[in-house]
Image: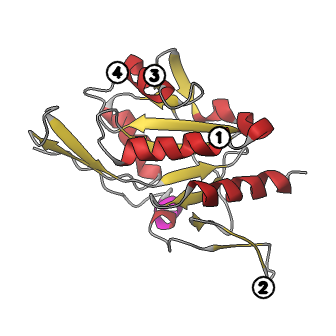
Amino acid sequence: MYRRIARREGAAGWVAALMVAAAVTVWLAGCSAAPAHEFAGAALEDPQPVPDFTLTAAGGPVSLSDFRDQYVFLYFGYTYCPDFCPTTLAKLRQIRSELGDDAGRMQVIMISVDPERDTPDLLARYTAAFDASFVGLTGAPDEIDAVGDTYGLFYQKHEGSAATGYLVDHSTRTYLIGPDGRALVAYPHDATADAILADLRWLLDQES
């Protein structure tokens, strides 16, 4: 048995298009021919707001809009993930630890693609093992699907494929959302911590 959530066309199609864009694109300053910064992921030339959402954390409901004024790294994963999820969260932990005084400007959110097993408390323990500031969210499958549609989320459950009962194949991109709620960059799994950190520092520098 499996569960597959694929991108559906609609008002949020521009974000799905971002997900399938080239791995590295150039952020353009207005209509200037000279690039202001080359990002380590697929960047939008004209960033657009992403829809707000509310899901469940260990402490209760949490919304994306709760983190306005921060740079949010949004990732879809699950606590039983043997590879992509722990390596991604470890990379984000490294980035936050190297931000120094600006660490508070960065927020990591992991949304579960395995709501059957990932309770709010389990997600809280899992994300806290990487960094106490990281937030794990879950919800009913239709709630997760509604959020995932914006980002072209794909996930597929494999029954009986692991000692834990099953594994979940899923999208591995990490999405950077700006302090104003606009989507900025979609990072592939192989984007390095140093490259993403350079992007974030550049964005922070633009604020001054």
Tag 4 and tag 2, C-beta contact below 8 Å: no
The crowd level at tag 4 (other Cα within 10 Å; few <14, some 14-19, many 20+) is some
x and y, in percent, of residue 69 in the image:
75, 38
Q: Quadrant of residue 30?
A: bottom right
Magenta stretch: includes residue 14 = yes
Can residue 93 be seen here? The reply is: yes
Task: Tell me which residue sits at (50%, 74%) in the image.
Answer: 22
Q: Which residue is mark 4?
A: 119
Q: Residue at x 60, y 74 (%)?
A: 25
Which secondary structure lies at badge 3?
Answer: helix
Q: Nearer the viewer, mark 1 or mark 4?
A: 1
Q: Quadrant of residue 39?
A: bottom right
| Left or right for 32, reference 188 | right
Q: For the residues marked 2 and 3, what is the alpha-carbon distance in whole angstroms?
A: 45 Å
Classify 10 Å Cα crowding around label 1: few (below 14), some (14-19), many (20 and above).
Answer: many
Report the residue marked by disc 1.
Answer: 96
Quarter of the picture containing the N terminus is: top left
Type of residue at label 2? Ala
Residue 33's label in the rendered image is 2
